[in-house]
Amino acid sequence: MAAVEHYLPETDVHPIDIAETLAEQCSWDFDRVGEDQISVAIEGAWRTYSLSLAWSGHDDMLRLVCTFDLNPPEERIGEFYRLLNIVNDKIWGGSFTLWREQKLLAYRCGLTLAGGAHATPEQISAMLHSAIAQSERFYPAFQLVGWSEESAELAVKIAIDEAYGTA
């Protein structure tokens, strides 16, 4: 992260400028949609994730939405919603929601910068990396519940079970 700080001035920097600098430094594909919004594509182990960061000066809020294609079959939708409730109970900094019309799963979180607070490169980097980490962590559970007969409880246990030792 020191490299990013080196390129950013010490004064107040727009959060989207910070995100753009991070994207450049990490060689991520990005599109500066406007003064207050940027879209970034980050390659994960399971898939490429589309992230959007948007600044609202009115709310003093930096919002992040990380999406990926996911369209579980109608017959699994009830169990899928049960899974979302279980997963969201395990996450402190954001939550998943299914956008059925767009056929997307979205992870959303926000950073409140009220009272004149300023975003730091570390905070924005943590937001981006956390969104990817949570999406990667639970992606196997989403797949299991969506396209098999696994229960939401078992799928979460399989997805977050840690392996110990080596083979």
Image (cartoon, rainbow, N blue to C red):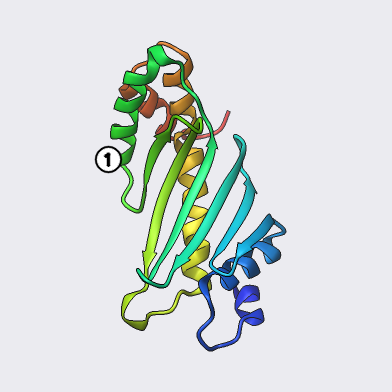
Q: Quick check: 71 left or right of 50?
A: left
From this view, report whether residue 151 is shown above or below residue 128.
Answer: above
* Residue for point 44% across, 44% down: 107
From this view, report whether residue 11 is shown above or below residue 65.
Answer: below
Q: Quadrant of residue 166?
A: top right
Q: Secondary structure at mark 1?
A: helix
- How many numbered tags mark residues here? 1
Residue farthest bottom in this picture: 11
The picture places residue 162, in percent across and down from the top left corner, at 44, 35
Quarter of the image with the N terminus in it = bottom right
The picture places residue 114, in percent across and down from the top left corner, at 32, 75
Q: Amino acid at mark 1?
A: Asp
Q: Quick check: 160 left or right of 129?
A: left
Q: Quick check: 18 left or right of 84?
A: right
Quarter of the image with the C terminus in it = top right
Q: Count residues near mark 1 (Cα–Cα under 10 Å), then give few for <14, some for 14-19, many for 20+.
A: few
Residue position marked by numbered label 1 in the rendering: 89
Q: Quadrant of residue 157?
A: top left
* Residue for point 39% across, 64% down: 111
From this view, report whether residue 132 is shown above or below residue 127.
Answer: above
* Residue for point 36% across, 83% down: 116
Viewer-side residue, 130 vs 38: 38
* Residue for point 54% across, 54% down: 52
The picture places residue 68, in percent across and down from the top left corner, at 54, 37
The picture places residue 101, in percent across and down from the top left corner, at 46, 30
From this view, report whether residue 138 is shown above or below residue 152.
Answer: below
